Structure formats: C-alpha cells, structure tokens
Amino acid sequence: MNNNIRFELSFKNISQLEKKLNFCRFNNIKNINIPCKGLIKKELFNATIVYISKNFHEFNVTYHYRLFHQYSKNKKKSYQDFLEFVKNSQTNKNYEILLVSGSNKKTNFDSIDALAHLKKEKNLKVKLGIAYNPYLKKYYNISTERDRFERKISTGLINSIWFQYGTDINVLESEVTYLQNVSKEEKLNLFGSLFIPSKQFIARFKFRPWKEVYISEKCLNTLENFFDFTNDLVTFYKNNNITPVIESDFSSLEKLSNVYSFFRK
C-alpha cells in the first residue's frame, strides 16, 4: 500500500518547495499533491506548476484547483483561467486536477458552475477529481452534498472522488456505499484524507477547529484513542481501495517513519 500513498506538500515559497521535493525524491516518494490554500494560490500556485514541470518530471502530481482562491476580476476571466489550466494538463499530461469550490464559495462560480461550462467546450476530453465531505449532513446540518455530487457526476467529467477528513467510519462507510451505487457506471478512483495523530495536532485543532471538519472528542481527548482510530481508518481505506492522502507534515525521516508505521501492520 505504501506505493499508492499520496503526500500533500505545504510550503511558503519555491525554496521550501524545492527542499520538500528533494526530500521526496531521496525517499522514493512519487505521488504528491499540491494544495491551493493559504499562501499557495495565484502567483505562487502558478509558479509552482512551472517549477515542478521544469525540474521534477518524475513526480505524479495532483494540483488542487480551488476556485475561490483562484478567482480573478470576474467570473468570465476566472473561468478562462481555469479553462487554460485544464487545457494545459490535457496537452502536457504532466498533472491531474482536483477541482475544489472551497468552504467559501463565489456566487454562481463554484465547481458545479465550472463543470457545467467545461462540458460545453468542444474538443476537450478531460477527467477531473472532485471533493466530497461525508460528514456535512450528520454533523453540520448541511444536506446538499449528495445533490451536488449527483450534479457533478452527471457531467461525465469526473474520474476521482477525494474524501474530506473526519473520524466517523460508520458515516464514511455509508457515504462510500451511496457513491458507489450512484456512480456504478463510472470508473472512479477513490482517495481519502489522512492525518497522523500528534499532541501538536490535537492542541492546534482544539484551539482553532477547521471549518466543516469533524474530529470526535474521543480522538481529541487522548492520543491513544486517536492512534486507534487512525489504524481503523487505514484498514478501512485498504479494504475499500481508497488511496490515503497524507496531509500531515512528513518532511523528516522521523515523521515519514511515523507515517509508514500505520501501513506496516
């Protein structure tokens, strides 16, 4: 399973990116994700694509294209930017795309709108990934996620689903079953977010919980409980052919060893 793990990189500038990519290269990590959040947007996001394409050809890269962060001037300009990004991926075949609206959404310009426009483009054959949050209905009283998924999958442009992180495997299992039933005619790759437990992670999440990310009090109360859950989640991912995406920092041998420890059992 180690060969299928994906690793998300966080960095503040190209220099930090270079160090992390070299670390990946040295440790035979090939599958990486580049998020579009924080400082990684607009100029830095675009510079990252150019830099990796020129200097690190061996990586299998998935770029998160977050429409909220990449919005520029108006909807028309923002869509044209996105279209060029999609065409570049199709022409060069040097990256794949995870399309994300973001927790904050621009009116009439989110992933559903972008996909609807993209479907109308001629001579454009492309497959995209989309995000899915299994926990919205139960824990945040937001009941639109399934409807949004069905509208996205109906475009015929989707080839992968990327699950938001959370700590209720029963809910996750129910949503995976639903998605498989709805999309049984589509060949979809499944990916699931994974964080490596630590005291620092727990302290940070307690101090500032992330919007629409559910982590149980049981996991937040003790590190042992969090480790037990993580082992269960890794097993669930393995049994359901869901590729883990490591979102915790892994850029030291000790941290990388901690990641791999969950996959040696």
Image (cartoon, rainbow, N blue to C red):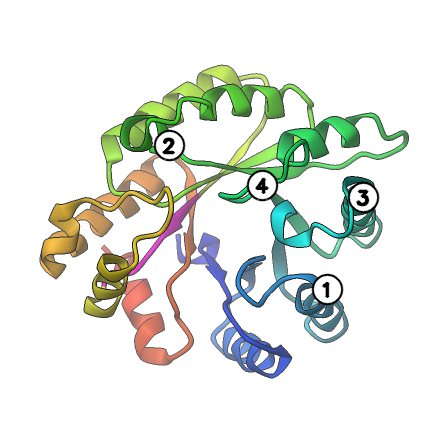
Describe the element under mark 3 as helix, strand or loop: helix
Q: CA distance from mark 4 to mark 3?
A: 15 Å
> Residue 136: image x %, image y %?
36, 31
Q: Nearer the viewer, residue 219 or 138?
A: 138
Instruction: Check residue 101 in the rendering and tell me which mark sits there, or answer none.
Output: 4
Residue contact between numbered discs 1 and 3, judged by CB atoms under 8 Å: no
Q: Nearer the viewer, residue 254 or 66?
A: 66
Q: Nearer the viewer, mark 2 or mark 4?
A: 4
Describe the element under mark 2 as helix, strand or loop: loop
Q: What residue does disc 3 label?
A: 83
Residue range corresponding to the magenta coloring: 192-197
Instruction: Check residue 134 in the rendering and tell me which mark sits there, or answer none.
Output: 2
Of callouts 3 and 2, the N-terminal one? 3
Crowding around mark 1 (Cα neighbors within 10 Å: few <14, some 14 to 19, many 20+) is few
Q: Nearer the viewer, mark 1 or mark 4?
A: 4
In the rendered view, tell whether residue 35 sits above or below residue 55.
above
Horizontal side, residue 189 vs residue 169: left or right: right
